[in-house]
Amino acid sequence: MATLIAVNVGLPKDVPWRGKHVRTGVWKHTVTGPRMVRRLNIDGDGQGDLDGHGGEQRAVLVYQSESYRFWEKELGRDDLRPGHFGENFTVDGLADDEVCIGDRYRIGGALFEVTQPRVTCYRVGLRLGEPQMAALLVSRRRPGFYFRVIEEGEVEAGQEIVKVSSGPEGMTVAEIDAVLYLQRRTREQVERALRIPALSPGWQGSMRTLLDAADGGTAESGNAGLTVAATAPPPAWPGFRPLTITRVQPESRSVFSLFLAAADGAPLPPALPGQFLTVKVQADGGVPPLIRSYSLSGEPGAGTYRISVKQELHGAASGYLRARARVGGTLDAAAPRGTFYLTDDSNPVVLLSAGVGVTPVLAMLHALARAGSPRQVWWLHGARNGTEHPFAAESRHLLDGLPHAHTRVYYSRPTSADRAGTDYTDVGRLSPERISGLGLPADADVYLCGPVGFMAGVTDALVAAGLRRSRVHTEVFGAGASLTPGVTSATSARAPHQPAGAAGKGPPVSFARSCLTVPWNDDQGSLLDLAEACDVPVRWSCRTGVCHTCELALMSGAVSYSPDPVEPPAEGDILICCSRPSEAVVLDL
């Protein structure tokens, strides 16, 4: 007989952590007497981060008294009380390896449905003073689970928990947690999970991605259900290799291209249309090489590569390449990488860019043209005028060969030499307002590249026009947006910089997107800690090697792990939250 042992609630508060403050509702206290359970919360309860916790699918968190006894022994603790794991209901019974997704239970006047296991989050470790707790909950297969509230009503400690109905497929909380987070999954398990209507939308999305990755042949390593990084194929070669410059070609007033080939003349491995190449630029003066990433703009599978570079006003690498790159010279390059690439499908595709953002979508246009694609292809590009419009003639030629192409080119300041109807179709900026009125197909996949502010406005306009946000794919030049869940006192936005204090004596760590190289310092616990000390934008959630939010490409070098990840990252990737450099490393960060 299952019983509700304790009802625990707590409102969000700011908690000091590593020199910052975290907004969290993980601190719960036990309440007595009847307590009303509503669709989103128990009265008196709240969540500090609604992106990761709470909402209809995660209204009530359940944890078992038997798991408390397990952790008391495992952790050597005698101070654990109901609510310590952040749960709302502490229960006797309802073990994770018995309760199934979709099971329904009545407690007092309320009816509940099991929707998903607990999410992996560093804040349960913060509450318990055990930094590895998020990983331990998964690896020991004791995550706990969430209830959705089917019928609101009052509950009280001591009440019996009555099972009303069983979920389809009989998939327990422990089993589906292992399907997502551990390597011991089968296709049959993923398909079973997707047949459970009660499974929360977020977990359904992860299961669909796992299935799509298996069907698309990109599931060789890593976990596609946790990170998009695992959906790309592994890099074609490790580290950097010298490539020969075979041609240098101007594309516009500020953009030029470098054509690259293997030194021995052998065909270079094909890149996916939209991926980028990371190169080392060895400047003068004996300083460390500059590391930069440039989109591949040429035809995929041609056996050679073309990268296109915009010369920035004070750009050290672009200026050096513009002045010094010569036919016959060499450039050290890592293998093509990136998760922004054209997928093989039959629905309409929108290739949308501004300025030099045209480079990755041009590679996609090449791929569509070479295949003679019957898809509807919308080519939308914005430039100042013809002098700042790279690949104008090349893109027109490719579009002419596609049977269902639609073209809109916007010049904000056309010159007298620019031909209306030929060089451009519209005067003005490619703005969100203009995009809203184009009548783009609602089922289109959109590939978008340009300045960050431009992409944000355009994405919102596309969604407002009826396109699904999940189908809008973006590529960011430079450092991406950070994800630091719950942190409310982040430092003011600063450009990446050397860390404070004495310089480290360890191997160099290069943050390629942030244009920064720093020596490793053993005082840092992980590469994530070092990145944060340098104000390099980072993404993380568990900080213990389980959620894969921090997974990124290791361009060169090697790392060691402590603790080991619950599941290894994709080949060529690392988890920076629990790794340290074993030698000089270059990170896609």
Image: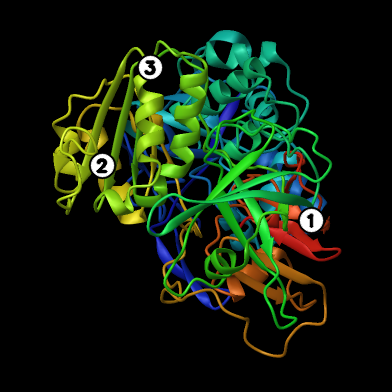
* Tag of residue 336: none
Please tell me which of labels 1 and 3 falls first in the chain: 1
Amino acid under disc 2: Asp
| Image disc number at residue 75 | 1
Foreground of the two, 576 or 269: 269
Q: Which residue is mark 2?
A: 460
Q: Check disc 2 and report its element: helix, strand or loop.
A: helix
Q: Earlier in the sequence, mark 1 or mark 2?
A: 1
Residue kind at label 1, given as amino acid type: Leu
Q: CA distance from mark 1 to mark 3?
A: 64 Å
Q: CA distance from mark 1 to mark 2?
A: 47 Å
Residue 483 at least partly seen: no
Q: Earlier in the sequence, mark 3 or mark 2?
A: 3
Quadrant where the C terminus lies?
bottom right
Q: Is residue 375 left or right of residue 30?
A: left
Q: Residue at x 65, y 59 (%)?
A: 326
- The correct choice, above or below, for 535 with respect to 177 in the image is below
Q: Residue 397: horizontal and vertical position, in percent?
A: 38, 27
Badge 1 marks a residue whose secondary structure is: helix
Quadrant in the rendering for residue 398: top left
In front: label 1 or label 3: 3
Across and down, in percent, residue 444 comes to 34, 22
The residue mark sitting in front, 3 or 2, is: 3
Q: What mark, if any, has residue 402 been given in the picture?
A: 3
**What residue occupies the far bottom of the structure in this picture?**
502
Residue 201 lies, in percent from the top left, at: 44, 27
Rendering coords of residue 243 (x, y %): 74, 50
Q: CA distance from mark 3 to mark 2?
A: 28 Å
Left of 152 or right of it: where is 98?
Answer: right
